Amino acid sequence: MNTPTDLSFSKEHEWVRAEGDIATIGVTDYAQDQLGDIVYLDLPSPGDSLSQGAKMGEIESVKAVSDLYAPAGGEVLEMNQAAIDAPELVNEEPYGRGWLVKLRLSDPAQMDSLLSAEAYDELITREMEENTD
Amino acid sequence: MSGDTLRQLPLAERHRELGARFAPFAGWAMPVQYSGIVKEHHAVRERAGVFDVSHMGRLFVSGAQAGRALRRAVTYNVEALEEGEAHYALMCNEDGGILDDLFVYRLASERYLVVNNAANASLGRERIASVLEPGVELEDRQESTVMLALQGPQAIAILSRVIDGEPPARRRCVEVDWLDSTLFICRTGYTGEDGVELVAPVEAGGALLERLVAEGVVPCGLGARDTLRLEAALPLYGNDIDTDTSPWEAGLGFAVSLDDGAEFAGRAALATVHESPPERKLACLQAQGRGIMRAGCSILHGGRTVASMSSGGFSPTLGVSIGMAYLPVELAQKGTELEVDVRGKPLAVAVVPRPFYRRKRAGQT
């Protein structure tokens, strides 16, 4: 599984790229792989205010629907219309063109509560082992 | 984990090597997907796919009066089937409620095969056992055989090459010798495509799977099986039909014979039900926007809940969500606009003709 080292991760399998107080959020490669073919995204709208850990939308694959949680709090600046129109982008490029939303972070210190790439890899390794037991 | 209590397919290891991901279904660890549900779905619509459906029940009924005995367990007049003919049928309770749906194949004049749902396999076996008469035997071959479904527009051409022979015509079945084994082939399926279902002893079944994969047939899991059958508007037992649904409201009247004088479980109740036209009908709904309707979602008309979805999901062929529901007949008309409550959000849907997808037949373009 491909886990970029310059990103931060939530236990709910979202990634965050923070540049100053602007954060780009998406779901991880592991998440898209577990979900399978993604066919529908319900994302928060620009102007929405999210608190860290709050439900911010839904991601739905052919198999099932999952909730999306805000890995950090802030005001929504942008949602990825291209991914809404073609949700398979999330499967194809989860860390690239398949990003979901951009936020203005309300408290950039919240980033410190997220996982490093190394810690996230350990998390998904444990999950994969549990799934094959 | 509950994994240790799940039944394993005889070819499970080979499916794992082919990239299968497994999930529990009706007590079995079943392949849900290999390369991805959408890819597998399109492979079946455009070329050919193979599904391991060995979780289905396989009951052989044989003896001089096999047909007469079996007739008492199912709704269709299976005694009238020709040798080599197959037909869809139901098992009902005394109230006429549907206990299971199944396929009956008349292999020879005194020999039948019944294929029923995994979740109901033991119920079917008990029901058939209860109608046996002297000289009629029931043999459960679920453990000693595998069942593969080869489906798609190229399925027949591929099978002809593999068995070096001619597959049977639609809804006909044959037994052929292949690799020192008997291979049962029937031109039936659950995808809306042309294709066959194959029953073989475990070893020959494994060899058959290898040959099919070598021919480029795409391994497919239960995920694609569900999206394919939903597009074809084929009912799924437990979702679209159960003890609370009648065959006629489900559009399955062709599975019930009431005029051959035979007695079978539920006959009297079904005859009464059949006297009046159904008040509701299993209808096909197609989403007008984004959002995915699923089984259990409420359906509203004029702000009032009129039904709940019996099946729903995403249609890879149409690119939108589709589903089925029992609607009052006045609403079950093509073009009726309704609203589905998808976890609190309204989704506009319209009634469309059944099925959602119909394969092109030979000569059509």
Image (spheres, grey):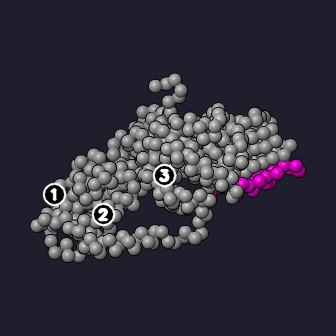
| Range shown magenta | B119-142
Q: Which residue is mark 2?
A: A2
Residue position marked by numbered label 1 in the rendering: A77
Q: Secondary structure at mark 2?
A: loop
Name the amino acid, label 3.
Gly
- Chain at tag 3: B
Whether residue B183 can be seen here? no
**1 vs 2, front mark:** 2
Horizontally, residue A126 falls left or right of residue B357, namely: left
Please tell me which residue is depicted at 50% across the width and 30% down the height of the picture.
B360
Which amino acid is tagged 2? Asn
Q: Are marks 2 and 3 on the same chain?
A: no
| Marks 2 and 3, how far apart at CA | 25 Å
Secondary structure under tag 3 reads helix
Say which of marks 1 and 3 sits in front.
Answer: 3
In the rendering, at what x and y percent does residue A132 appear? Answer: 48, 68
Dividing the picture into quarters, in which one does residue A70 lie? bottom left
Q: Which dot, 2 or 3, sits closer to the camera?
A: 2
Asked whether B284 or B114 is in front, the reply is B114
For the residues labelled 1 and 2, the Cα–Cα distance comes to 27 Å
- Which residue is under mark 3? B223
Closest to the observer, B262 or B176: B176
Q: Is residue B190 magenta?
A: no
Residue that protrudes farthest toward the right in the picture: B134
Who is closer to the viewer here, B77 or A130? Answer: A130
Q: Find residue B33 and report its horizontal and vertical position in percent.
A: 47, 54
Task: Please tell me whether residue B124 belongs to the stretch shown in magenta.
Answer: yes
Q: Amino acid at mark 1?
A: Leu
